[in-house]
Image (cartoon, helix red, strand yellow):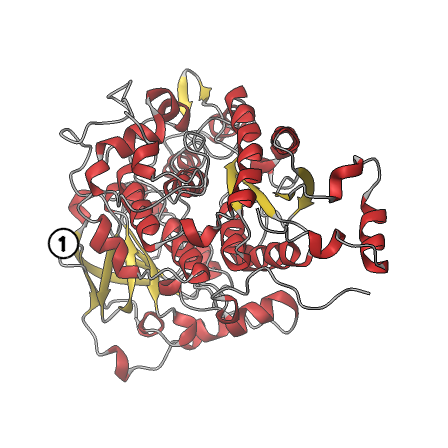
Amino acid sequence: MSELRSAQWYGGNGRNAYIHRAWMRRGAPPDAFTGRPQIAIANSASDLTPCNSHLNEVAESVKQGIWAAGGVPLNLPVVSLGETLVRPTAMLWRNMAAMAAEEMLRANPVDGVVLLGGCDKTIPALLMAAASVNLPAIVVPGGPMLTGTFRGVPLGCGTDVWRLSEEVRAGTLSEKDFIDSESSMIRSRGHCNTMGTASTMGLLAESLGMVLPGTAGIPAPDSRLLARAHESGRLAVELVEKQRRPSDVLTRAAFRNAIVALAALGGSTNAVVHLLAIAGRVGAPLSLDDFDGIGADVPLLVDLQPAGRHLMEDLHRAGGLHAVLQEVRDLLDPEAVTVSGRPLVDEIGTGQIFDHEVIRSRGSPLKPHAGIAVLRGNLAPDGAIIKPAAATPELLAHRGRAVVFDSVEDMHARIDDPALDVDADSVLVLRGCGPKGYPGMPEVANLPLPQKVLRQGVRDMVRVCDGRMSGTAYGTVVLHVAPEAATGGPLARVRTGDLVTLDVAARRIDVDADLDAREPAPAVLAALAQPRRGWEKLYVDTVLGADTGADLGFLVGASGDQVARESH
């Protein structure tokens, strides 16, 4: 093994080396600074990120594994983003969390890092950071929660919130029953138990090769997660010894495999912006069109909410990620390696399915073509996406009159107005919710249906938005419309009454109007974010479009792990 990076701090007998060692001793063994890899544990545990609140326990197992392999573990708290709590949206700070983690990894005397994440933005942010600093790294996903039940019926966190709240608005479920279900939904530690963004990104991190094979998807309370965390700590030391870095793993082939997995799993649409951003950091060629070109014909094999019926505990019991990948093995790139140093196609082994109700075989899929569809047209020149697996089939080819909302506030104020001129065939358009406009691209695109159509028995309508939707959500929703309204995109020029045509088979979203001849609606411009200081201003001034991953322009790419100057 070549000289450790940390020796730049601890090696020698000069004044600076003395300072660095002396302040770090504090009970460490005498040989802690002589040839032992220093492994940071980038820990996103926080009581305000409930899905990650158990990661301190996971970190203890990682520490034991690092010590056992001859390394020195170092807890490094990183920015933690709780999807359910932070306002205006956790996506506003994904890039900040990535930048802060990258800078702290580069600035400190560490040789490798174990990345602990769970909630939606934490694993993407940590992978972006790891890609940019390119120190040997491995991810340990925190895992999903166990299945909660209410009156004998399993509850999917997120998905059933949207479903039950619409039934209250429709008048078919009492508010009391709705509130009574609240204490039943979150049964244990862990992130969402549906195939939401947290579950998706944990599984895709393994599909990318950045997780110890066989780890992603283990439920958070399962003791096997702690055993895998221990093994991951050991492997982190080996990664340093072999100098196996993220740039060796996060190749074009790895992203191809992640897109195949995304489709087969029925994963979150949010994976599109996250994978694009990670690829942008490591320099792997990846475009929005790749999600359609690679994933469109991949079958949906996993019967999980929101696209299906079951939950993450069922997926793990039924054979997990490896069983799914075994079914689409011929679609995987055999060149892609994992942190183990072995190809992903070798690591999935036999991948046996133990419950064919949860994981379907290739010959009997839930849907034969389930990947993310990329749409273009005069409403989305730079692209938009839709998840056919979570949509109503009859609405995938639809023509209807636009009902336009100029902001989230406008939507909330008018959506249930009895005078709203809307029917089941209308197309609901919500704008001003892109990266710059909100700011941060919130999960509001699956806007609630108008109460008047809910009470007619309608449960889905075509919706169009430049924002995102929760990975736990469902419906015929056109998302990530680019360019967004805030940058002068066509969405800002649509008017109520315009005819909108959605044709997913033709990959089109169009409006019957000369949008270029119109000025943006004044109400849209008035509602856009106009921050004056702080992170929000930096974000709005520099964020890129959803079609490239919504990273900040100056953060795309990598700076490596070297720091030229001393601190004293």
Left-right relation of 552 to 531: left
x 57%, y 46%: residue: 1
Disc 1 designates what residue? 505
User: Most extreme residue toward the top, as rendered?
Assistant: 152
Q: Nearer the viewer, residue 442 or 91?
A: 91
Q: Amino acid at mark 1?
A: Ala
Residue at screen point 23% across, 54% down:
292
Q: In this rendering, is residue 400 above or below 22?
A: below
* Left or right: where 488 falls relative to 59: left
Label 1 packing within 10 angstroms: few (<14), some (14-19), many (20+): few
Quarter of the image where one finds residue 172 = top left
Q: Position of residue 519 (x, y in %)?
A: 35, 82
Q: Quadrant of residue 64?
A: top right
Q: Is residue 8 left or right of residue 226?
A: right
Q: Position of residue 439 (x, y in %)?
A: 51, 64
Quarter of image, res 376: bottom left
In the displayed orientation, state which residue is furthest to the bottom. Answer: 517
Residue 412, image x, y percentages: 46, 54
- In the image, residue 36 above or below residue 450: above
Q: Secondary structure at mark 1?
A: loop
Quadrant for the C terminus in the image: bottom right
> In the image, is 13 to the left or to the right of 155?
right
Q: Which of 321/315 is in front?
A: 321
Q: Is residue 417 visible?
A: no
> Is residue 225 depicted above or below 17 in this figure?
above
Please count the marks in the image.
1
Q: Position of residue 425 (x, y in %)?
A: 21, 53
